[in-house]
Image: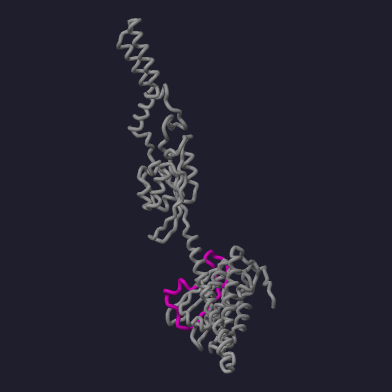
Amino acid sequence: MAETDEDDRPEGRLARMLGRVRSSRWLLAAAAGLAVLAVALYEVPPAAALAGVVVLALVAAAGGLAGPARIRGKPVRAAGTPVWPDTGMKLLVEVMEDPCFITDGTGIVRYQNNAATERFGAGRTGDPLSFKLRVPELLAALERVGRGDTVETVRFGERVPTERAWVARVAGIRMGKREGRPRADFIFVRLHDETEMMRVERMRVDFIANASHELRTPLASLTGFIETLLGPARKDEVNRERFLKIMLEQAGRMARLIDDLLSLSRIEMKAHVRPEAAVDLARIVDQVVDMLGPLATETGATIRRAVADGGHVVRGDRDELIQVTANLVENALKYGRDGGLVEITLAAERGPDGADGRLLTVRDDGPGIPPEHLPRLTERFYRIDADQSRRRKGTGLGLAIVKHIVARHRGRLTIRSKPGEGASFSVWLEAAKAAEAPREAS
């Protein structure tokens, strides 16, 4: 950020000259005394003596007698406090990724790094920090630090243009040792963006709340039926079998939810490790179709495969890719049209960067998905119709698991749908090298 040094302004230069004269006042007083003696004892003309004193004063003002030391050609005050950050301070602030400001002890901006300019816009040196950050808590902390406090931490949020969370560290900088708690020469303000951390924390809280709710409902049902069987229905042979069937169904629901939670946890633990094994995606499709044949028969749906010619070996984890394919096909069978068609296609396709890959697409001809739901489909426990999902024995975690697995494989998940035209879920995965052969059980 470009700035004009206050000490280079006319009023600054005049102040420096007056300061030099003041610092040389005893020498000038001695010179004046000698001039008086020269006039009285040696009959030196008064005008010449006075001229000598004036010349000495001009030399002092120019810095020849008691001027300040100069560092890299820039004056540094010998007494008092500096009013501008030095080059080293600026270089240190500039390498920080967080937005940073340096103000004087009263909150006037003296410097801001590029990160601050990119986030809050270019500022004008000499303006108060309040022109950029209209946060009462932060400005109050700035004032306290300027008066002598050492470090303060302030958390605040923004709602426009997008919601963001910030934590500000405000620290005073003092040049030289002084007793007590004097005012800060400079104040350093560093802003750290905690939006992502806030989002993760919010997701964690929501996840715990949703998981607790999903487990509490079947657990309450189980507890109620057990109490009934131990009490009023102890000898009710007719209802006992019906109650036990309901209990078995609720226990199965809890087991599915726990399995999905554990699966999601395992995937997240390995999120940073990309699978490198060679897996035949065409064989996985065949296996999933055979596995979900009974569900297709139950719903009256038809599964049709369209696998392009050629090899379809990709880099991945076989079990996780089976889970991805099974989740997508199962969703199509459950939420598509009863008696409808579920089509699975597999073909070669280049990635955005030109990498060789394979595109797996599962398409149904059901009622489709309203556009407002599409961005949230992969959120944990998000359901378009919660009642229908429970009737279909869904946990609300299937697509979240798919998203995390695809992300771990460095792949791409695409969802397309229009109301009344069905839904299409596509997964792109990078192909294995030609020399690699699938390493999987038959």
Instruction: Single out the residue that lies furthest toward the front.
Output: 231
Regarding residue 384, the answer to whether it shows in the image is yes
Residue at point 35% right, 49% down?
A: 131
* Residue 28 position by quadrant: top left
Q: Is residue 65 magenta?
A: no
Is 236 situated above or below 344? Answer: below
User: Would residue 88 appear left or right of 442 to someone viewing this image?
Assistant: left
Is 231 situated above or below 310? Answer: below
Horizontal and vertical percent position of residue 69? 45, 28
Magenta-drawn segment? 349-377
Quadrant into which the N terminus falls:
top left
Horizontal and vertical percent position of residue 284? 62, 77
Q: Is residue 354 magenta?
A: yes
Horizontal and vertical percent position of residue 303? 56, 85
Is 251 situated above or below 14? Answer: below
Q: Nearer the viewer, residue 160 or 433?
A: 160
Q: Nearer the viewer, residue 204 or 345?
A: 204
Is 248 situated above or below 33? Answer: below
Instruction: Single out the residue that lies furthest toward the top.
Output: 42
Quadrant into which the C terminus falls:
bottom right
